[in-house]
């Protein structure tokens, strides 16, 4: 993987304005962002050679739920770090996801009044990128 | 015989006359008859001779006459003497005869008047004579008796009878006197009934000492025997009666000795009647004072001569069991004893007493039950007059049961006056009638009460019971629960819609943030794009400023934030799973909350949290709590904010908050205690109600404490309570179960 590749952030969210706002903010932060409205095109993009270290995953998605998507992505790209961005108040992290290293700190509830902290976390995860 | 004794008196004069005549004859003297009469004699008439003869004759005659006179005088004297003697004797004799006749008459009268008769037997011991009285008294005809022996008249064939007769015959044959020998005749009287006779007799001997038979008296004792028999029967019957009486009947003398006792009495002493009555000393199985008390009662009755009623006394029977007796003691003069005794009737009331005690105990028990009821219970008769009040009712009315009894319930409980129709209806229909949530005004505060009127259906006890339950707090809780349910449904709805709402809110908030960022002059990307298209960012910003665009953007952000807050609050009302639960370091959590409170932006505007002194009083034995950290943090933060705000608003001089933790048997306790203005009872009662607020309109949503309450009670199965008094601060206590599960 190239260093450039490591700067990519993957956003999967079916809400266009959320997706685009996040993308815009992160890009303003100097990050490269690939945003998709569903899991399938994101997987396609990765399959086609797309690569990233950090994925911001929505939970309620048109083709599958976010947890399943994380499992698939983690299976295929074990080095990928995940942040969960959900509009569901009752979301709780499944045990197997915790086993992958996710914790409650990875969960960001919509709406984000300030995207700063999320961006900071993304930068940290992207910079820390595990080898 | 006096006739014979007078003969010598006549012989004397005759002899003298004969002698004188002889002399005269021999002396030729004419002799005169001593009786005076001149007897002519055949003598020769010679005169001288004659004269001499006459002379001598005269002398002789004179002599004879003198002698005769003398004799006659003597004789007269003797005769007179004798006559007097005779007359005296005659007189005496007449008097003796009179006395004899009187005595005879008296004897006859006595014999005839007496119940006794006279009998005589010959030497063969056969009846020879029976006075009339016998026949008159016994009615037995003479022919049945005369010529027969006594035992031939008798009846009875028992061994005792035979023995009695044998002894009697023996006695008679030995010619011994006897007294009061009683027997029954086999010969019937005019009614054909045998008679009871009692005889006494003594042997009769003639001049030569020869046994001539028996003579004696007899009495008919039939009536006496009958009377005695009747008396005995009557006594026996009485005895049976008093023995049949299950109560103790007895008579005692002043020393406590039993003169009489019925079987019940004897049995109580474990003795027979005879044993008890013949005892020479007092008998008691109880303590000494028991006997002393009884004796003193006896004496009191004997001395005063008045009856005494002892409503209750203890008597220990022979088994050692104490019995309760009700005794009446009556002064009683025993026939033939002269001295006053005491007659007692004792009724064993142990069972009644026990039953009474049981009834009393039961009554108390039932009273306790109805007193323990939290409800106001009022028993009324069909006309609405109070019969019973329980303790609650007494408290509410301020009247005791005794005082309220018999008064119309509407007078004692004016708030229930309108229930009289329900009372009548309940009794008429025999069904309880309920008036739920009746509104009452108690001390100018609105209260709710459920009123039930139950008809009393017991035999002969018609009436009703009015039950009044103050359900104010329940109504409040219910309304709170309704609110909570509402909130829950709101929460459920919010949770369901959160995604749909949060996404557009996210779009709004993120979008406005991006807009503000992308018009900012200091961002290199902005400047680069602006330069590339020839826009002066500074001027653009001035434009946006002047046109209020920045202001509108701020407005959009603030509105978005507020909407997000509302959604978040609404989401708090949803039941969360315990997946957020975990072991939390309590002190660390509290410190976090204190930091949060101190840095809270909104709070800073209103007060300086740093001015408030925080006293930490942590239980060192308590470290970890099992809870949803963020939720409990929210609760404690809420409490701290409320305390701080109340103290600031009131201007409490030295505001202080104690944050305290304690370990309780089944809960951990977190307390937030302030020294602020406190709350009155009205506020306390409603403090956890949703949308209840004491703050100014717009200053609070009124959800803070209800959300806290919801978190602690619903989500953590704990308790959130508050105690406060106006001017004395407030203490909020959070109790979380140490073990998973609800706090009782």
Image: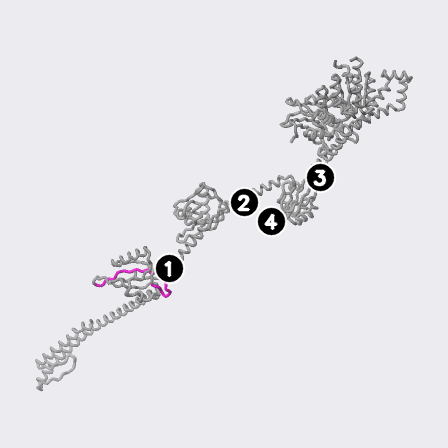
Q: Residue at x 71, y 42 (%)?
A: B438
Give the chain letter at badge 2: B
Q: Give the residue pinned by disc 3.
A: B447
Please determine whether, in this image, residue B402 is positioned above or below residue B225.
above
Q: Give the residue pinned by disc 2.
A: B356
Left or right side of A86 for B428: left
Question: In front: B331, or B474?
Answer: B474
What's drawn in magenta, residue-wise?
B187-207
Give the chain letter at badge 3: B
Q: Position of residue B670 (x, y in %)?
A: 68, 26
Q: Position of residue B212 (x, y in %)?
A: 24, 63
Q: Give the residue pinned by disc 4.
A: B459
For disc 2, the neighbor class at 10 Å (few under 14, some 14 to 19, many from 20) is few
Q: Earlier in the sequence, mark 2 or mark 1?
A: 1
Calculate the distance from the C-alpha at mark 2 to the C-alpha at mark 3.
Answer: 42 Å
Residue B137 seen in the current view? no
């Amino acid at each position: 993987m190239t260093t450039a590749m490591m700067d990519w952030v993957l956003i999967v969210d079916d809400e266009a304005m959320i997706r685009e706002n996040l993308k815009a903010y992160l890009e303003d932060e100097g990050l490269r962002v690939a945003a998709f409205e569903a899991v399938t095109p994101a997987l396609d993009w990765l399959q086609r050679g797309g690569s990233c270290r950090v994925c911001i995953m929505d939970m309620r998605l048109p083709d599958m739920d976010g947890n399943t998507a994380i499992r698939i992505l983690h299976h295929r790209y074990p080095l990928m770090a995940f942040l969960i961005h959900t509009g569901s108040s009752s979301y709780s992290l499944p045990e197997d996801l915790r086993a992958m290293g996710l914790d409650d700190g990875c969960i960001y509830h919509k709406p984000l009044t300030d995207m700063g902290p999320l961006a900071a976390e993304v930068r940290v995860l992207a910079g820390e990128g595990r080898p | 015989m006096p006739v014979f004794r007078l003969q010598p008196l006549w012989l004397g004069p005759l002899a003298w006359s004969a002698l004188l005549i002889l002399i005269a004859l021999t002396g030729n003297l004419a002799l005169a008859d001593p009786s005076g009469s001149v007897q002519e004699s055949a003598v020769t008439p010679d005169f001288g001779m004659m004269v001499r003869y006459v002379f001598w004759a005269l002398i002789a005659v004179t002599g004879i006459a003198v002698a005769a006179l003398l004799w006659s005088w003597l004789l007269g004297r003797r005769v007179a003497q004798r006559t007097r003697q005779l007359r005296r004797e005659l007189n005496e004799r007449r008097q003796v005869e009179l006395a004899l006749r009187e005595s005879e008459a008296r004897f006859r009268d006595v014999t005839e008047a007496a119940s006794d008769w006279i009998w005589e037997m010959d030497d063969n011991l056969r009846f020879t004579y029976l006075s009339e009285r016998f026949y008159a008294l016994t009615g037995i005809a003479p022919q049945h008796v005369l010529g027969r022996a006594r035992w031939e008249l008798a009846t009875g064939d028992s061994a005792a009878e035979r023995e009695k007769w044998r002894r009697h015959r023996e006695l008679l044959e030995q010619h011994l006197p006897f007294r009061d020998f009683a027997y029954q005749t086999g010969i019937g009287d005019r009614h054909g009934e045998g008679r009871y006779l009692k005889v006494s007799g003594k042997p009769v001997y003639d001049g030569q000492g020869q046994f001539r038979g028996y003579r004696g008296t007899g009495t008919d004792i039939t009536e006496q025997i009958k009377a005695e028999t009747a008396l005995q029967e009557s006594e026996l019957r009485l005895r049976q009666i008093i023995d049949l009486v299950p109560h103790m009947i007895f008579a005692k003398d002043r020393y406590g000795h039993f003169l009489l006792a019925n079987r019940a009495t004897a049995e109580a002493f474990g003795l027979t009647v005879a044993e008890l009555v013949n005892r020479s000393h007092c008998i008691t199985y109880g303590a000494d004072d028991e006997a002393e008390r009884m004796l003193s009662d006896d004496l009191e009755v004997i001395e005063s001569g008045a009856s005494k009623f002892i409503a209750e006394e203890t008597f220990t029977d022979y088994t050692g069991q104490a019995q309760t007796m009700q005794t009446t003691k009556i002064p009683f003069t025993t026939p033939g004893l002269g001295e006053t005794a005491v007659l007692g009737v004792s009724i064993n009331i142990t069972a009644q007493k026990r039953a009474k005690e049981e009834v009393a105990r039961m009554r108390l028990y039932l009273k306790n039950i109805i007193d323990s009821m939290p409800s106001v219970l009022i028993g009324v008769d069909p006309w609405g007059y109070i019969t019973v009040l329980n303790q609650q009712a007494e408290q509410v009315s301020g009247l005791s049961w005794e005082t309220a009894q018999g008064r119309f319930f509407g007078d004692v409980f004016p708030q229930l006056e309108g229930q009289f129709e329900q009372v009548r209806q309940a009794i008429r229909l025999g069904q309880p009638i309920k008036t739920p949530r009746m509104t009452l005004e108690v001390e100018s505060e609105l209260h709710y009460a459920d009123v039930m009127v139950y008809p009393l259906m017991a035999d002969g006890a018609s009436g009703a019971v009015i039950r009044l339950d103050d359900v104010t707090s329940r109504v409040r809780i219910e309304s709170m629960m309704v609110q909570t349910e509402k909130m829950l449904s709101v929460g459920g709805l919010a949770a369901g819609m959160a995604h749909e709402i949060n996404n557009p809110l996210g779009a709004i908030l993120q979008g406005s943030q991006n807009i503000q960022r992308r018009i900012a002059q200091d961002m290199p990307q902005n400047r680069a794009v602006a330069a590339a298209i020839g826009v002066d960012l500074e001027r653009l910003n001035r434009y946006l400023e002047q046109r209020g665009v920045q202001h509108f953007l701020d407005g959009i952000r603030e509105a978005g934030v507020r909407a997000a807050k509302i959604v978040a609050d609404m989401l708090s009302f949803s039941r969360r799973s315990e997946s957020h639960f975990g072991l939390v370091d309590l002190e660390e959590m509290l410190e976090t909350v204190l930091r949060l409170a101190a840095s809270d932006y909104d709070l800073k505007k209103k007060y300086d949290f740093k001015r408030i002194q925080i006293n930490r009083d942590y239980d060192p034995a308590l470290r970890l709590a099992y809870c949803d950290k963020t939720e409990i943090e929210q609760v404690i933060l809420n409490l701290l904010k409320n305390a701080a705000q109340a103290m600031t608003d009131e201007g409490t001089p030295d505001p202080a908050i104690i944050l305290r933790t304690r370990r309780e048997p089944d809960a951990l306790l977190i307390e937030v205690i302030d020294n602020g203005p406190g709350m009155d009872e009205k506020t306390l009662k409603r403090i956890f109600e949703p949308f209840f607020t004491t703050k100014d309109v717009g200053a609070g949503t009124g959800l803070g404490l209800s959300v806290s309450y919801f978190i602690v009670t619903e989500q953590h199965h704990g308790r959130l309570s508050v105690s406060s008094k106006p001017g004395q601060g407030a203490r909020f206590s959070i109790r979380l179960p140490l073990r998973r599960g609800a706090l009782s």
